Image (cartoon, rainbow, N blue to C red):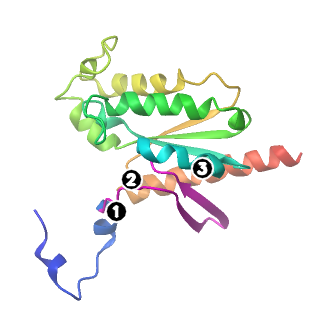
Amino acid sequence: GINAEYGYPNYIPNEQDVLRARVRSTGIEEAEFKFDNLEFRMLDVGGQRSERRKWIHCFDCVTAVIFCAGISEYDQTLREDETQNRIHESLLLFEEICNMAWFRETAFILFLNKIDLFKEKISRVDLSTCFAEYTGGPDFEAASNFMKNKFLEQNTSPHVIFTHFTCAISTENIAYVFSCVRETILKNILSDIF
């Protein structure tokens, strides 16, 4: 339920309130921030189908592409098309983006997000409801590796894809993942220079 504190005019959200807030991204949102003395300029290009045509001009000269997919959504459909499964749509989009000519040499960082929800859901909703070829049952390791491989199979380009299982509401997990992202970006920059 809704916390009664939200209705008060002097309410100040805490860290968990902010982490759990959901804002549907549309259009292109830009954020600049610093993490471990490295400045990031991140573009959120909105995952909705109607927004995709607006992305293309953002793809010039990127250092890395971070692709985020909610892997717990394997039994859900899109808001804008209730006939299309969300994880199948993510796989199609990932295939399209990671194989674009612009990104042949670009590092890809794949966030398989909502791993906490996925772990809980896999014990109740078999992954074979979405992928008939999946035979691992409710085993979390088998299911998460299967999902990782489904995404990696979409890549036909020569670039490397770094995969991380993430939980966006876990500050420790996100700090670790961004530390890994930072290292990936720095390695890419150094390899371009030398």
Q: Which mark is residue 19?
A: 1
**Residue span colored magenta:** 21-47
Contact flag, marks 1 and 2 (Cβ < 8 Å): yes
Q: Along the line of sight, which residue is nearer the eye, 163 or 158?
A: 158
Identify the residue under disc 3.
Answer: 181
**Of pointers 3 and 2, the one earlier in the residue sequence:** 2
Quadrant placement of the C terminus: top right
SS of the residue under disc 1: helix
Quadrant placement of the N terminus: bottom left
Q: What residue sits 83% from the left and 45% below the top?
A: 192
Q: Along the line of sight, which residue is nearer the eye, 90 or 121?
A: 90
**Of pointers 1 and 3, the one earlier in the residue sequence:** 1
Contact flag, marks 3 and 2 (Cβ < 8 Å): no
> In the rendered view, would you say 91 is above or below 69?
above
Q: How far apart in space, not on screen, are marks 1 and 3 (Cα)?
A: 20 Å
Identify the residue under disc 2.
Answer: 168
Q: Is residue 68 left or right of residue 30?
A: left
User: Amino acid type of disc 1?
Assistant: Leu
Q: What residue sits 66% from the left and 65% below the top?
A: 39
Magenta span has 174? no
> In the rendered view, would you say 32 is above or below 94?
below
